[in-house]
């Protein structure tokens, strides 16, 4: 019993350290590369990182980091749903923007009062995002069109349709700003104070992001549907042999990804500007791809990645005060994405080698009294296989 517990907890500790090692190595490597770039440019790296840290830990900045992080996190979840199925949904950017536009138009029209209008905005955003993503899914299963190509094209189409709808049908000109009618006050979601006396409030949609993260984990890790989705992503042949409809899973996964993508703009619609305009945040879908890679599609890892990304974005302007271009942060973000992919591959290879060595020791240990063909040998060999499964 003691030996079994030692092997169990030893493996848990190893797996935990390996899971943490990859992103930590990536961030450290990004810091080193950024420091080299700063030194080449004749700028002090220590002062730059100190400036970022000092500004990022202020209460007001922490609120901004959380508010941006909410949208980043939801975007990462939308991308991760596709990743778990081995689908590359690059169309999250177009899906959330067209969903936000239509939802803002209906919300501003105030067809129903109060909380019902809030629910209507959320439902419409999810439905529009799901329908837009379903186009790519259907093209994949009926015509064999790669979702990478179709979603890139759908992003461009969504941009054109959105501009036309805003200018010709939904837009109202207020000064120099063209946007939808504001969502009525009764349908807005109030913010929450982070620190007493801080004028800015944490976006109330933070609760939605937490709920989505929990739902993502439970659905994909604790349900049969999630198992089938992950299994299909790893091997379509094995999924077919198990009776799983691959075409159905592709369409359903794209629809789910699009539905989550439709929620990305809600923190802005229901908790910030309360309308869709030319100033609406763009590019969040591509940010979500980077964060999903950084967090390895894990809800907690993506949450940390979203906060890190938001911290860098919101603190970058402070570098200009010490005569350092804020674009250095973009260099750092790019290096993080590249290095995290390399780090995960290195950690994966180390894990494979470690598992192989452990199996070898288990099999070697079975060649004692009773021999490898005896009961003790069978048990040891079976334990070794189970530990590497």
Image (spheres, grey):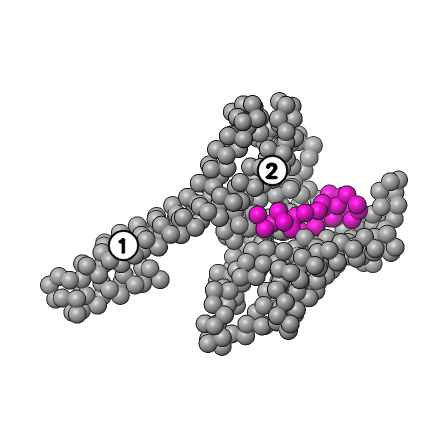
Q: Nearer the viewer, residue 266 or 17?
A: 17
Q: What residue does disc 2 label?
A: 330
Question: In percent of the image, x 62 and y 37: which residue is there?
Answer: 313
Please, is residue 301 above or below residue 63 in the view?
Answer: below
Instruction: Indicate the position of residue 281 as horizontal and vertical percent values.
Output: 71, 45
The quadrant where residue 109 appears: bottom right
Label whose residue precedes the other's in the sequence (1 or 2): 2
| Segment tinted magenta in the rendering | 262-290
Mark seen at residue 357: 1
Front one among 37 and 274: 37
- Picture residue at 70% right of the left edge, 59% below the top: 153
Q: Visible in this render: residue 215?
A: no
In the rendered image, the quadrant that contains the C terminus is bottom left
> Residue placed at 30% from the left, 63% from the top?
385
Q: Residues within 10 Å of mark 1 (few under 14, many from 20)?
A: few
Q: Rounded to the nearest whole Å, what is the CA distance between mark 1 and mark 2?
A: 41 Å
Q: Label 2, secondary structure: give it.
A: helix
């Amino acid at each position: 019993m003691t030996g079994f517990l030692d092997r169990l907890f030893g493996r848990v500790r190893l797996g935990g350290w390996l899971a943490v090692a990859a992103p930590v190595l990536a961030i450290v490597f990004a810091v080193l590369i950024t420091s080299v770039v700063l030194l080449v440019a004749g700028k002090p790296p220590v002062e730059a990182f100190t400036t970022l840290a000092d500004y990022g830990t202020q209460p007001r900045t922490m609120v901004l980091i959380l508010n941006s992080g909410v949208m980043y996190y939801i975007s990462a979840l939308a991308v991760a749903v596709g990743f778990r199925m081995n689908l590359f949904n690059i169309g999250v950017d177009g899906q959330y923007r067209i969903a936000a536009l239509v939802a803002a138009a209906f919300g501003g029209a105030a067809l129903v009062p109060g909380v019902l209008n809030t629910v209507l905005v959320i439902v419409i955003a999810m439905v529009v995002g799901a329908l837009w993503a379903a186009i790519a899914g259907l093209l994949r299963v009926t015509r064999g069109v790669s979702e990478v190509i179709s979603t890139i094209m759908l992003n461009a189409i969504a941009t054109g349709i959105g501009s036309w709808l805003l200018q010709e049908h939904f837009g109202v000109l207020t000064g120099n700003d063209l946007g939808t009618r504001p969502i009525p006050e009764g349908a807005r979601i109030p913010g929450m104070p982070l620190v007493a006396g801080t004028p800015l409030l944490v976006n109330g949609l933070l609760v939605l992001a937490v709920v989505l993260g929990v739902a993502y984990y439970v659905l994909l890790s604790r349900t049969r549907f999630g198992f089938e989705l992950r299994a299909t992503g790893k091997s379509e042949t094995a999924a077919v042999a198990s009776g799983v409809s691959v075409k159905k899973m592709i369409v359903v996964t794209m629809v789910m990804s699009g539905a989550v993508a439709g929620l990305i703009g809600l923190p802005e619609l229901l908790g910030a500007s309360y309308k869709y305009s030319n100033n609406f945040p763009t590019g969040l879908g591509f940010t979500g791809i980077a964060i999903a890679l950084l967090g390895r599609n894990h809800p907690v890892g993506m949450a940390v990645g979203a906060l890190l990304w938001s911290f860098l974005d919101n603190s970058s302007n402070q570098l200009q005060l010490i005569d350092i271009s804020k674009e250095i942060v973009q260099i750092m973000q790019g290096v993080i994405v590249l290095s995290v992919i390399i780090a995960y591959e290195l950690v994966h290879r180390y894990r494979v080698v470690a598992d192989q060595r452990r199996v070898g020791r288990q099999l070697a240990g079975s060649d004692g009294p009773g021999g490898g063909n005896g009961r003790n040998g069978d048990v040891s060999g079976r334990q070794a296989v189970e530990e590497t499964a």
